[in-house]
Image (spheres, rainbow, N blue to C red):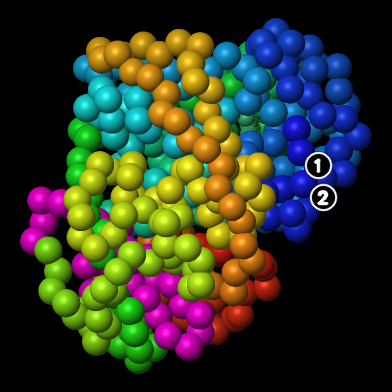
């Protein structure tokens, strides 16, 4: 286990670390500790995964994936990353409707914080969760499903209710996405066409360096391709990184080339370190998995760490349906004031920020 988060801006203050290899071992660790906090893949840029007690990772638990193709759902080990899970879903002809900017994050860690991708009609990653299994403070193993009145508050729980060991996620039929980047979007144009810009694709993000803006438009491959200009911005002639100056090789394929959902919805490719974190966190999955059960035979992909470089500050906007609800915006309502306010504040973090 590591003593810092991915960005290295947080040094954890945990007295001890635990990496149990079985549920019963995890239960004993939790029951025997006065304070416990789970650590996912360590990508949060604040102290949310920190504790002065025992910091526990579930990454050492058996890594199982059970795909139910008829019910379109998967029950997976909570410590798996989206990069590890997604190819197995794709092999079964299924998909998650949304993914975050990074595929490197763990399912449990992402859902615990309400991590979002983008898309006016897409929920955040936690909205796919239909059941969670967790070890609670007394060391009990409990499972909550949507039918349980306690379920909603237990999903985006910031690691406060227990150590999540397995999660069941709703799936959709696999789909293809094509991604285009448009550069030179003027502030005025962003203000004036905010709704149209975010409605222009299945998943749309806007990145800014507070001088100029860039649109990352991910449309369903079955939708018509965009032109060379969008709201005054022009199509990037070559592959880009969301962070100017960083290698475009770290980014998922653009230029309108269609690809499977998990190869286009994240901004960054799993085999590279995104933005400026530690390459340790571009984690390689094991070459074999404890168990993968699905209608099709599946194998782990090969992922290797990449290099890291410092990058300038950058910021992005993304949208998902839960974000619209949280900001009190209705479908036809006025421009989101939360977005306006946040745009005017420079980022204080060295990390790439997604602002909702
Ligand atoms: C470069 C970069 C890009 C990002 N892009 C996006 C983005 O596009 N959209 C977005 O919304 N966010 C984004 N984030 C934020 C990131 O997705 C969240 O911080 C996410 O929670 C990280 O997941 P993790 O697995 O690293 O969890 P951690 O950071 O390790 O932990 C996060 C929380 O989850 C809890 N937790 C972890 N595992 C468990 C478990 N097994 N049981 C119970 N609780 C658990 C922890 O206790 C903690 O409270 C980005 C972060 C970075 C660094």
Task: Look at the image and tell me in which quarter the N terminus lies.
Answer: top right
* Residue 152 appears in the picture as rendered: no
Residue under pointer 2 = 11
148 horizontally vs 309: left or right:
left
Image point (51%, 66%), residue name: 246
Above or below for 75 versus 48: above
Which residue is nearer to you in this view: 8 or 114? 8
Whether label 2 touches label 1, CB < 8 Å: yes
Question: Within the displayed image, which quadrant is ligand 1 positioned in?
Answer: top right
Label 1: how many Cα within 10 Å (few below 14, some 14–19, many 20+): some
Query: Of marks 2 and 1, which one's residue comes earlier in the chain?
Result: 1
Q: Position of residue 75 (x, y in %)?
A: 42, 20
Q: Quadrant of residue 218?
A: bottom left
Which stretch appears magenta? Answer: 195-224
* Residue 41 appears in the picture as rendered: yes
Image point (35%, 89%), residue name: 186
Q: Position of residue 32 (x, y in %)?
A: 86, 17
Disc on res. 3: 1
- Gap in Å between the C-alphas at discs 2 and 1? 6 Å
Secondary element under disc 2, as helix, strand or loop, is loop
């Amino acid at each position: 286990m590591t003593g810092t988060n991915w960005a290295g801006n947080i040094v954890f203050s945990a007295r001890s670390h635990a990496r149990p290899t079985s549920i019963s071992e995890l239960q004993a660790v939790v029951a025997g500790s006065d304070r416990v906090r789970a650590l996912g893949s360590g990508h949060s840029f604040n102290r949310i995964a920190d504790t002065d007690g025992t910091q526990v990772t579930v990454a050492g638990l058996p890594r199982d994936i059970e795909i139910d193709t008829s019910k379109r759902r998967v029950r997976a080990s909570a410590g798996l990353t989206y990069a590890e899970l997604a190819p197995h879903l794709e092999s079964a002809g299924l998909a998650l409707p949304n993914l975050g900017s990074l595929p490197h994050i763990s399912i449990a860690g992402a859902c615990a914080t309400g991590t979002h991708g983008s898309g006016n009609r897409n929920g955040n990653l936690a909205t796919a969760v239909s059941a969670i299994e967790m070890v609670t403070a007394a060391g009990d193993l409990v499972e909550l499903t949507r039918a349980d009145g306690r379920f909603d508050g237990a999903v985006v729980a910031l690691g406060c209710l227990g150590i999540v060991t397995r999660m069941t996620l709703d799936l959709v039929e696999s789909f293809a996405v094509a991604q285009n980047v448009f550069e030179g979007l003027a502030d005025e144009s962003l203000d004036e066409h905010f709704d149209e810009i975010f409605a222009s694709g299945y998943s749309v993000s806007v990145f800014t360096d507070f001088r100029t803006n860039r649109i990352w438009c991910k449309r369903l491959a079955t939708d018509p391709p965009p032109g060379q200009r969008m709201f005054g911005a022009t199509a990037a002639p070559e592959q880009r990184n969301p962070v100017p100056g960083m290698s475009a090789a770290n980014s998922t394929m653009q230029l309108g080339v269609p690809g499977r959902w998990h190869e286009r919805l994240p901004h960054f490719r799993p085999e590279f370190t995104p933005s400026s974190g530690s390459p340790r966190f571009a984690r390689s999955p094991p070459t074999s998995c404890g168990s993968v059960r699905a209608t099709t035979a599946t194998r782990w992909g090969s992922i290797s760490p990449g290099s890291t470089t410092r990058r300038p500050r950058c910021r992005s906007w993304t949208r998902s349906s839960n974000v619209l609800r949280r900001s009190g915006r209705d479908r036809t309502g006025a421009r989101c004031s939360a977005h306006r306010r946040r745009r005017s504040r420079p980022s204080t973090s060295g990390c790439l920020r997604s602002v909702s």
